[in-house]
Image: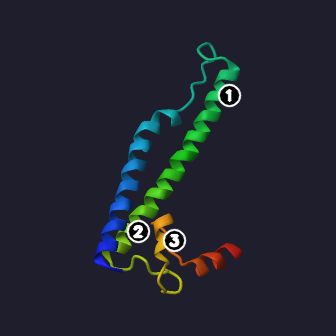
Amino acid sequence: MTVLDADKFRARLEELRSELESVAAAGEESAAVVELDQTKVGRLSRMDAMQAQAMAQASSQRRKNSLRQIAAALQRLDEDEYGLCAECGNDINPKRLEFDPTAMLCIDCASKAEQH
């Protein structure tokens, strides 16, 4: 991979990380504990709040997973291993990396992994 390509992917990964961190900061309030005091909130409203809380927690977990994948991709860039399949060592198609800059597997190895 050329230096120019690595810089492009690093910039894209850092942009994604920044976006996720901004969303995470804004979404912390949604995942807060729902109060049990039914004099303040009716039963149905509380159930809606609990559902919204569960969805916010799931979104938060997905963001954390994405941030871990981004950090791993940036580490691979630092170690000059970015763009190489973690399974077979072959190059990952640049178009695959453009679609998902955190991809660790080439399309063949990813297909095999999904079958198992």
State which tag comes first along the sequence, 1 or 2.
1
- Residue highlighted by disc 3: 96
Give the amino acid at mark 2.
Answer: Ala
Place of residue 105 in the rendered image (x, y in percent of width and height, measured from the top left):
53, 76
Quarter-wise, where is residue 36 in the image? top right
Q: CA distance from mark 3 to mark 2?
A: 14 Å
Quarter-wise, where is residue 109 in the image? bottom right
Q: Residue at x 61, y 81 (%)?
A: 108
Q: Is residue 60 left or right of residue 26?
A: right
Place of residue 11 in the rendered image (x, y in percent of width and height, measured from the top left):
33, 61
Give the amino acid at mark 3.
Answer: Arg
- Residue highlighted by disc 1: 47
Q: Of helix, strand and loop, which one carries label 2? A: helix
Of badges 1 and 3, nearer the viewer stands 3
State which tag comes first along the sequence, 1 or 3.
1
Of badges 3 and 2, nearer the viewer stands 3
Residue 116 seen by the camera: no
CA neighbours of label 1 inside 10 A, class few (<14), some (14 to 19), many (20+): few
* 111 or 86: nearer the viewer: 111
Place of residue 74 in the rendered image (x, y in percent of width and height, measured from the top left):
36, 67
Q: Residue at x 36, y 51 (%)?
A: 18
State which tag comes first along the sequence, 3 or 2.
2
* Quadrant (top left, top right, bottom left, bottom right) of the C terminus: bottom right
Quarter-wise, where is residue 6 in the image? bottom left
